[in-house]
Amino acid sequence: MKIYGDTQSGNCYKIQLLCHLLNIDYEWVPVDIMAGDTRTEHFLRLNPNGKVPIIQLDNGTVLAESNAILNYLAHGSFYYPDDALVQAHIQQWQFFEQYSHEPYIAVARYINVYLGLPENRREDYQAKQAGGHKALAVLETQLSKTPFLVGDEPTTADIALYGYTHVAHEGGFDLSQYPKIQAWLQRIAALPGYQAMIKRS
């Protein structure tokens, strides 16, 4: 299996992390989104939406969208149990991640880490802070009730939210005010097979 991705992307890192946790072999195909690699004719044939990550299975099948990939790869494991209600709760958190978390935390991080916080994006960066803290407060509330997002065991919901939450400080979000999130981050990092994100040199 091939994973096409950018090592600094939280969405791409999610896939790498799950593969390490489940001991899934893969070939990493680096994609530099700032250099326009996702807009090449070759990449657009794989994913017309022009976004990473994508995976390409041994039979040539291509799957896009990070959370769909997570659930596919985790199928049959305890990270994505067969119970339909548990799966719905996992997907509920994954939709939350894509619509209420990532648009603020990941975008603020992108403006800072990828773009270097240029002056013409500073107002946009600041505008993401309130929404990001609202999302973090939702996580904090849930994690005050359960050790992981869907109960006592980690699932792909946790992997999905971990991707950008653990680097939220790079988008200007101070996690010191969220002790339950901090403890949850430590629990994820202590999972057998855990692999840290490769930091930009």
Image (cartoon, rainbow, N blue to C red):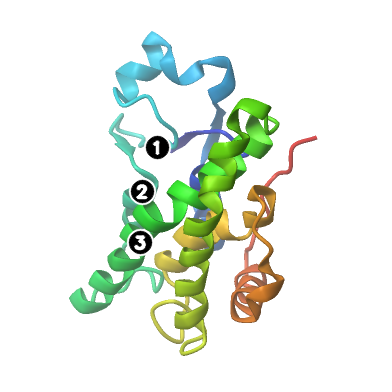
Q: Which secondary structure, mark 3?
A: helix
User: Residue flagged by tag 1: what amino acid is it?
Assistant: Ile
Residue receiving disc 1: 55
What amino acid type is highlighted by mark number 3?
A: Phe
* Residue nearest the viewer, comparing 184 with 20: 184
The reply to whether callout 1 and callout 2 are in contact (CB within 8 Å) is: yes
Residue 134 in the image: above or below residue 38: below
**Residue 3 relative to residue 176: left or right:** left
Residue toward you, 155 or 142: 142
Say which mark, if any, is on residue 69: 2
Q: Which residue is mark 3?
A: 96
Q: Residue at x 67, y 28 (%)?
A: 119
Task: Residue lying at the far right in this picture: please name it.
Answer: 201
When the figure is inspected, residue 108 is found, relative to residue 155, above or below; the finding is above
Which quadrant is home to the N terminus?
top left
Query: Could you tell me which secondary element the residue under label 1 belongs to?
Result: strand
- Quadrant of the drawing holding the C terminus: top right
Question: Where residue 125 sits in the image (x, y, percent)?
Answer: 58, 42
Residue 57 placement (x, y as % from top left): 35, 37
Q: Earlier in the sequence, mark 1 or mark 2?
A: 1
Give how far apart the Cα atoms at labels 1 and 2 are.
8 Å
Q: Nearer the viewer, mark 3 or mark 2?
A: 3
Which residue is pictured at 29% across the width and 64% down the height? 91
- Residue ID at (37%, 24%): 50
For residue 115, the mark is: none
Query: Are dots 1 and 3 in contact, CB under 8 Å?
Result: no
In what element is the residue under mark 2? helix
- Please tell me in which quadrant of the rendered image residue 117 appears: top right
Q: Is 91 drawn above or below residue 65 in the view shown?
A: below
**In terms of sequence position, does the residue under pointer 1 or pointer 3 come before the other?**
1
